Amino acid sequence: NGRNNNEDNFYFNKKHLPKNNKGLRTPLKYKGTTDDCPFFAVFDGMGGEAKGEEAACIASEVFADELKKLDEIVIPGKELFNSACQRANKAVCDFSDKKQIGTMGTTAAALYFPQDEVFVGNMGDSKVFRIRSNQMTQVSEDHTDEKILSSMGIAKKPVLLQYIGVPDTEMAIEPFVSKGDIL
């Protein structure tokens, strides 16, 4: 693709990548239990040039900071993901304004495991799937105009309606969060 850097980032067991990175050479492993209330997220940067990697990195840093709270308290999944998305959105928009960049952003998809539950959250079109009994089901919700376009018989690439990096003067972001059982 001609890019020197990876435009994506993640939050995985208290770790994330620096802004300038080329991805991982080996997979990360998690050794723990749901008693630790693990939280995992991926961020797919968008905006071209270095904008996507900046947005994804900012979001991963904000999530890392927000999730430090889990060291002391258990936070309900919807509240945790919504708070992290709101803070990340403000940080990306503030960075964009300060640098006079214009549109930049990142999608996000996350899993949070407090005890025997799982919370799935997403912003944009990054997807989360569940595999059970050899069946794969999408459990996230795409924030695009695809349903509207298909109902009108229009075949074109869907446009993102929600993502991290939407100025609050345009609209309030509304992260998707659902709760399920691990077992």
Image (cartoon, rainbow, N blue to C red):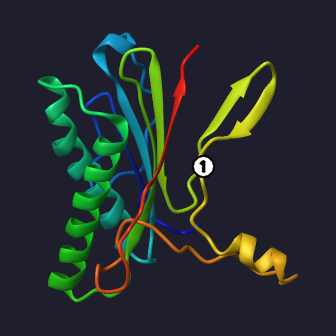
- Give the side of residue 63 with respect to residue 144, left or right: left
> Relative to residue 113, is residue 158 depicted above or below?
below
Quarter of the image that includes the C terminus: top right
Q: How many numbered discs?
A: 1
In depth, the one of 161 and 8 nearer the eye is 161
Q: Which residue shows up at 29% across the image and 50% down it? A: 60
Q: Residue furthest left?
A: 72
Q: Which residue shows up at 32% across the image and 11% down it? A: 35
Residue 13 x, y percent position in the rendering: 31, 27
Residue 126 x, y percent position in the rendering: 56, 54
> Relative to residue 117, is residue 119 depicted above or below?
below
Q: How packed is label 1: few (under 14 Cα within 10 Å), some, or many (20 or more)?
A: some
Quarter of the image that includes the N terminus: bottom right
Asked which secondary structure carries label 1, the reply is loop
Residue 26 appears anywhere in the view: no
Q: Amino acid at mark 1?
A: Lys
> Relative to residue 174, is residue 117 depicted above or below?
above
Q: Quadrant of residue 164?
A: bottom left
- Give the side of residue 46 with respect to residue 103, left or right: right
Q: Which residue is mark 1?
A: 127
Q: Quadrant of residue 85?
A: bottom left
Q: Which residue shows up at 24% across the image and 80% down it? A: 96
